[in-house]
Image: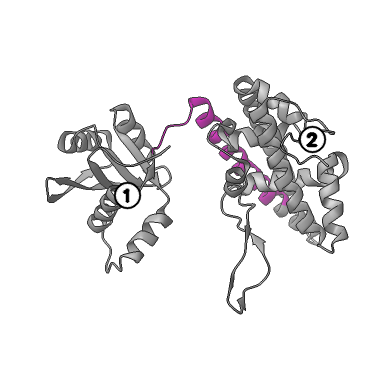
């Protein structure tokens, strides 16, 4: 939800150990530094009050405890992309950088710009994302062990004990990956039973991809149209032309959503054969001379459009579906 600020704005520059706070009393700008702990959060609320709009940058895990605390106290929280603030500061030709200055720029941004009010995710979604991160770490470790095992097997002299240990590690990691994936899918199916069934009705999308889509899109509750979903997945085309200057080909942005892009790309191979709309799109683009990889990316976009429409409408996939908005011949 994007809103203008009717509350006093507080700028917060968050680091691992401290919070640089900037707030305004009448016309006077004040600064405060507190620890990035619950005691520091309490000191912040005591100085500024709870009913404020607190503006901060997304800093991974460092800002989450603060955001949750302020939300629980009844404050409005805005968590901004650091690049947005960086461009805002550059636009005003600021010189120099410090935590105090950054907090003051966050205060100014919150006073001058419309911002999205942050809302904490459901507990089950937080748990699922943590399981997803664990699964990705296990997959990376398995790849490293497999590469080490292959390298060792290619050597003219190799230790049997070393081979045995690496094989045991790979087996253990494989078992752990299977367990984590099963736990993750169980949680998602419990929370999104109806949506999982709808997504699995789309030819080309399986149970794992359906679960990852729902986790990635938070159940499709925060999107007004499919273009927002495609942009979040980093599948929007990006063109760079200016006058006679043309920089390379049109490519996708690849901004965010790396995991879901990879899953969708794998799904696109079966979708171009089994999914009628995706097959027609793929064949048309190839017939126009487009390379097959570009056509597969278009299929990924098509799958996201179908997923969005099906979850929002509650109607399972229909191969002969015709939109009511389509013009009649």
**5 is within the stretch colored magenta:** no
Is residue 173 visible to the viewer in this orientation of the structure? yes
User: For mark 1, what is the residue?
Assistant: 15
Measured as percent of width and height from the top left, residue 315 is found at 72, 25
- Quadrant of the image containing the C terminus: top right
Name the residue furthest front: 329
Dot 2: element: loop
The image quadrant of residue 92 is bottom left
Decide: few, some or many residues near mark 1? Use Cα within 10 Å; few <14, some 14-19, many ≥20. some
Q: Is residue 281 left or right of residue 84?
A: right
Give the alpha-carbon distance from disc 2 to disc 1, as whole Å.
52 Å
Write the start and end of the magenta stretch as one range.
117-146
Can residue 175 be seen from the camera position used here? no
Q: Which residue is mark 2?
A: 322
- Please report the residue visible at 80 percent of the width from the left and 38 percent of the height from the top: 204
Answer few, some or many: residues within 10 Å of disc 2's Cα (few below 14, many 20 plus, some between 14 and 19).
few
Number of the front mark, 2 or 1: 2
- Please tell me which residue lies in front, 170 or 292: 292
Q: Is residue 10 left or right of residue 115?
A: left
**Quadrant in the picture for the N terminus:** top left
């Amino acid at each position: 939800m994007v809103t203008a600020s009717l509350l006093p704005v507080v700028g917060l520059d968050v680091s691992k150990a401290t919070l640089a706070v900037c707030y305004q009393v009448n016309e006077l700008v004040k600064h405060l530094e507190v620890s990035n702990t619950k005691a520091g959060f309490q000191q912040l609320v005591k100085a500024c009050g709870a009913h404020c709009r607190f503006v901060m940058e997304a800093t991974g895990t460092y800002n989450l405890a603060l955001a949750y605390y302020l939300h629980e106290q009844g404050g409005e929280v805005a968590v901004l992309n650091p690049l947005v603030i960086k461009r805002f500061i550059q636009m005003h030709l600021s010189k120099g950088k410090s935590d105090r200055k950054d907090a003051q720029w966050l205060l100014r941004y919150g006073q001058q710009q419309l911002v999205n009010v942050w809302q904490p995710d459901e507990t089950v979604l937080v748990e699922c994302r943590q399981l997803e991160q664990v699964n990705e770490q296990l997959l990376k470790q398995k790849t490293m062990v497999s590469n080490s095992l292959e390298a060792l097997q290619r050597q003219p002299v190799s230790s049997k004990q070393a081979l045995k240990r690496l094989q045991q590690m790979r087996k253990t990691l494989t078992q752990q990956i299977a367990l984590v994936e099963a736990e993750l899918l169980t949680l998602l199916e419990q929370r999104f039973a109806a949506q999982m069934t709808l997504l699995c009705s789309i030819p080309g999308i399986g149970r794992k991809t359906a679960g990852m889509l729902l986790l990635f899109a938070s159940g499709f509750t925060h999107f007004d149209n499919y273009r927002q979903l495609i942009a979040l997945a980093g599948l929007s085309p990006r063109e760079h032309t200016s006058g006679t200057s043309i920089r390379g080909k049109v490519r996708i942005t690849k901004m965010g959503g790396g995991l879901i892009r990879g899953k969708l790309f794998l799904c696109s191979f079966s979708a171009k054969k089994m999914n009628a709309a995706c097959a027609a799109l793929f064949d048309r683009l190839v017939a126009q001379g487009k390379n097959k990889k570009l056509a597969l990316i278009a299929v990924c976009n098509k799958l996201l459009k179908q997923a969005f429409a099906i979850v929002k409408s509650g109607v399972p996939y229909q191969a002969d579906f015709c939109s009511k908005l389509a013009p009649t011949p």
